Amino acid sequence: MQERHWERVNSVCDASIHPDHTPLRLQAVLQKDFQDHIHELEAISETASREFTIENILRTMLNDWKEIKVELSPFEDTGTYVVKGESIEEATLLLEDQLIQTQTMKGSSFAK
């Protein structure tokens, strides 16, 4: 979970949990009556999980472009370039696929 999720947990449970700095012990969980907030904690966990999935998809999408090699060719004497060769088709297919993925993610209530 990200820091923002832990802040919500702390707010809901009136706690001060920072798992990167202090280990969370069962005794502390029981003392804070976390079980009384189970529904809110489940919602926070679900949000964190879905956001994590979206973040992983975005990282994968970014890495996919590292494999694409684009060939550029000067266009006459204009000082501009055009994409040439097989790289056009490969880049276009990847772009179309990722546009669909992005639109699907954008529709999610977990995307910001």
Image (cartoon, helix red, strand yellow):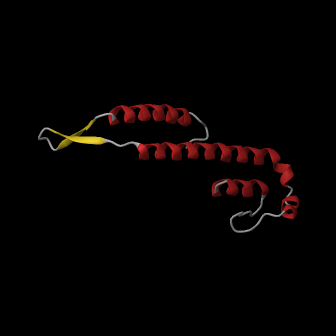
Question: What residue is at 82 percent from the left and 47 percent from the top?
Answer: 38
**In the foreground, 62 or 89:** 89
- The single residue placed furthest to the left in the displayed view is 77
Q: Position of residue 11 (x, y in %)?
A: 73, 56
Q: Position of residue 75 (x, y in %)?
A: 17, 38
Question: What residue is at 87 percent from the left and 63 percent from the top?
Answer: 27
Q: Which quarter of the rendering shows the C terminus? A: top right
Q: Position of residue 80 (x, y in %)?
A: 19, 42
Q: Quadrant of residue 33?
A: bottom right
Question: What residue is at 64 percent from the left and 58 percent from the top?
Answer: 3
**In the foreground, 85 or 111:** 85
Question: What residue is at 49 percent from the left and 31 percent from the top?
Answer: 100
- The single residue placed furthest to the bottom in the displayed view is 21
Drawn side of residue 35 relative to residue 94, left or right: right
Drawn side of residue 2 relative to residue 16, left or right: left
Drawn side of residue 74 relative to residue 64, left or right: left
**In the foreground, 94 or 13:** 94
